[in-house]
Image (cartoon, rainbow, N blue to C red):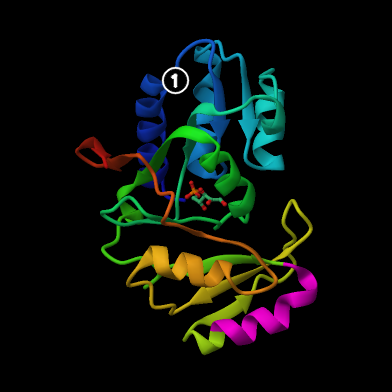
Amino acid sequence: MSEHQLKLKQDVAQAALHYIDDGMILGVGTGSTVNCLIELLPKRRLKGAVASSQATEDKLKALGIEIMDLNFVGELDLYIDGADEVNPNLQLIKGGGGALTREKIVAAASKQFICLVDESKWVTQLGLEFPVPIEVLPQARSYVARQLVKLGGEPVYREGFVTDYGNVILDTYHLAVNSATDMEQTLNNIVGVVCNGLFAANQADKLLLAKESGVEVLSR
Ligand code: 5RP
């Protein structure tokens, strides 16, 4: 990552701190942008955090932040996470780090989802450049790949990677994501798919977009 990109990630993480209150149980995403935020979390006295991956959980624990089980905390006030691509409807592609399923669960269980990106993630249409990561049960990998080809996609098996849930990822290029909500549903309907990286029906509520000129806030 270039120094410039790291600076944008740090800027957007700093801006996100404004939305986090003392006493909150915060849903915390995964990735290099969120890692910049995690470093700042000791500035707040959180009641605890729900982590979206083992990697995030380890980082939070190292800072002494209490990890809570989503099943015992009810609805979260706030989930904060990064994204691989974001469109003007604040719909996202996520899962570059392979944590998409747990991320989607924690996002769905939160009242508000704030997404943090630098300007390189902003696109007019999802999926033209970044592939849609699809988490698949290992036994169904070839079957699901054939269905993705029928949809016009080009699935690439993420070699040597296993998700926190013991599944595999098919990074799928060239899917026609004209309607992100329709494609999200279509992918979910393939037997053997656990989750897909389109966050369309349940998109971000707010986007903090880091640019050279400052951090823009977009709401839907
Ligand atoms: C992990 C994700 C990340 O949010 C996404 O890959 C963005 O990562 P980064 O902040 O490192 O650019 O979805 O599964």
Q: Residues within 10 Å of mark 1 (few under 14, many from 20)?
A: some
Q: Is mark 1 within 8 Å of ligand 1?
A: no
Q: Is residue 83 left or right of residue 65?
A: left
Residue 136 image position (x, y, % from top left): 69, 68
| Residue assigned mark 1 | 20
Horizontal and vertical percent position of residue 5: 38, 46
Quadrant containing the C terminus in the rendered view? top left
Q: Is 168 above or below relative to 156? A: above
Q: Residue at x 51, y 37 (%)?
A: 34
Q: Residue at x 41, y 68 (%)?
A: 182
Q: Position of residue 127 (x, y in %)?
A: 40, 69
> Residue drawn 50% across and 72% down?
186
Name above or below for residue 170 compared with residue 37. below
Residue type at mark 1 is Ile
* Main secondary structure along the magenta-highlighted residues: helix
x and y percentages locating residue 112 in the rendered image? 42, 33
The one of 33 and 47 positioned closer to us in this rendering: 47
The answer to whether 30 is drawn above or below residue 176 in the figure is: above
Q: Which residues are magenta?
A: 137-148
Q: Is residue 141 magenta?
A: yes
Residue 16 among magenta residues: no
Relative to 94, say whether 183 is above or below: below
